[in-house]
Amino acid sequence: MAEAYFPVGPGLGLEENFLSLDDILMSQEKLPCRAETTLPRLAFALGQGAASGDSIPEGTKLEIPLWLAKGLHDSKRRIISVELPKIYKEAWRTVFSADANVVDLHKMGPYYYGFGSQLLHFDNPENPEIAQTILQTFISRFRRIMDSSQNAYNEDTSALVARLDELERALFQAGQKGLNDFQCWEKGQASQITASSLVQNYGKRKFTDMDG
Amino acid sequence: RQALEEMRALYERNQADVSEAKSGRTDLIFLIRFRHCCLLRNQRCLLAYLYDRLLRIRALRWEYGSVLPNTIQFHMSSEEVEWFNQYKKSLASYMRSVGGEEGLDLTQDIKPPKSLYIEVRCLKDYGEFEIDDGTTVLLKKNSQHFLPRWKCEQLIRQGVLEHILS
């Protein structure tokens, strides 16, 4: 029960944690944007042309991952301009304000909150509304997550967890862990020394030889 | 695995050199910037991976004790082994400085103990095990013993023994 492995968690708000694996995965998500000027020689890298000498004409729509968008985005906006993914647009915002609990956030991009926070980096006139929407969605979904995590003991939780995005899943697991620990304590297992989960995992995995 | 990633990083660095050589032409600025982003990205992924490995190795010290099984050591690079040894030494010197003359073994008693002697059952064949007053105990699978707590704690955490509650 006493865990010794503490991985680096995702960042909060506008900043990402450099070393956090969750943040790295999250910034891999793609973002639609438009090329503002002609981009020479980039066609092969972005998957648009066959020959390596092609350039991307002005105005083409591209889907690039978030880390690239952040790097190429400049306040003078010479290179690319970013559009919002549809889940952060007006139509979906009204859905969220109507009832946030029905939306399947995992299907919509499993990093709704984190990605949304990063989007606020790009100057966009709708930023305050996006921020508000994200916050309100979280508030309205939170109660259900808390309830279900504290009351589902020893059950199959996959139905409950399927519609949550990554941040909510982490919360859910924290709740479940608290519940399990409390049950252990009630049963008197708190003083039982157990083999750590790391040890148990190593025992089960068969080590294969590294090739190459 | 690490070797492959280092190779990839070197290759990207070569690409960066090539693009720098052409940086006299200003319309290639975007390309340079693009490559720079890729390099930074690779660097970040590499660093995060290595750092995560270090965190896990540190956890291993707390769970497994001072000696790592060979299968795990086989998968660690030589720098990681050295890091592990240094961490062991730092931890040992810290434990010695805390709590009086002989020091305090912080890796014991992670959960508050209820009694001095505990009942354990053996899960795997371990061989002979000597206790403080000199008696040896043969640990075979499924044999039960009544042993002092501090001796068994390591073995329980490694999965060799199992703690039984009465």
Image (cartoon, grey):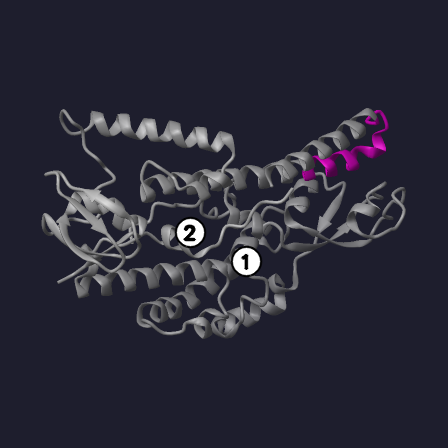
Residue A74 visible in rendering: no
The C terminus of chain B - image quarter: bottom left
Per the image, label 1 sits on a secondary structure element best described as: loop
Q: Residues within 10 Å of mark 2 (few under 14, many from 20)?
A: few
Eyeballing the image, is A211 above or below B66? below
Q: Amino acid at mark 1?
A: Tyr
Name the foreground residue: A166 vs A86.
A166
Position of B133 with respect to B48 (left or right) is left
The N terminus of chain B - image quarter: top right
Q: Residues within 10 Å of mark 1 (few under 14, many from 20)?
A: many
Answer with mark 1 or mark 2, whichever residue precedes in sequence: 1
Q: Range of the magenta residues? A: B22-38
Q: Amino acid at mark 2?
A: Tyr
Q: What's the mark number on residue A62?
A: none
Q: Nearer the viewer, mark 1 or mark 2?
A: 2
Residue B2's image quarter? top right
Residue A149: give x, y in percent of width and height.
Answer: 35, 67
Q: Which residue is painted at 38% across and 27% down in the image?
A: B86
Q: Which residue is painted at 87% across and 43% down in the image?
A: A52
Chain under numbered label 1? A
Per the image, label 2 sits on a secondary structure element best described as: helix
Q: What's the mark number on residue A111?
A: 1
Residue A39: give x, y in percent of width and height.
Answer: 83, 43
- The residue that disc 2 covers is A202
